[in-house]
Amino acid sequence: MTSRENTCKACEGTGMLADDEGWQYKCSVCNGDGIYASVDAERPARVMSVDENNRLLD
């Protein structure tokens, strides 16, 4: 089990996120691992395109 400090705060350690319609997808913060380590902090942030309803565009 991982320590509380290393648990991804975006997905709360589950590795999955869900949108307002219930669609589930892999957490982009921890890459689906549920663990956020200092090594992950060195990855550059991705800027993603969204529509007017703040939905991700493919």
Image (cartoon, rainbow, N blue to C red):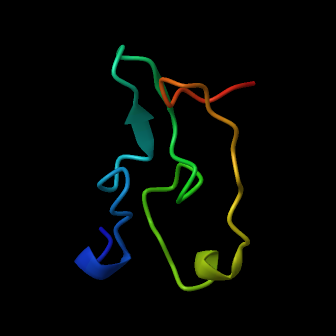
- The quadrant in which the C terminus is found is top right
- The quadrant in which the N terminus is found is bottom left
Q: Residue lying furthest front in this view?
A: 52
Q: Nearer the viewer, residue 19 or 30?
A: 19
Q: Residue at x 43, y 39 (%)?
A: 16
Quarter of the rendering containing residue 13:
bottom left
Q: Position of residue 51 (x, y in %)?
A: 60, 26
Q: Position of residue 45 (x, y in %)?
A: 68, 65
Q: Is residue 16 above or below residue 31?
A: above
Q: Residue at x 51, y 79 (%)?
A: 37
Q: Nearer the viewer, residue 53 or 27?
A: 53
> In the image, 18: left or right of 29?
left
Q: How many numbered marks are there?
A: 0
Q: Is residue 49 above or below residue 18?
A: below
Q: Residue at x 73, y 71 (%)?
A: 44
Q: Is residue 18 above or below residue 28?
A: above
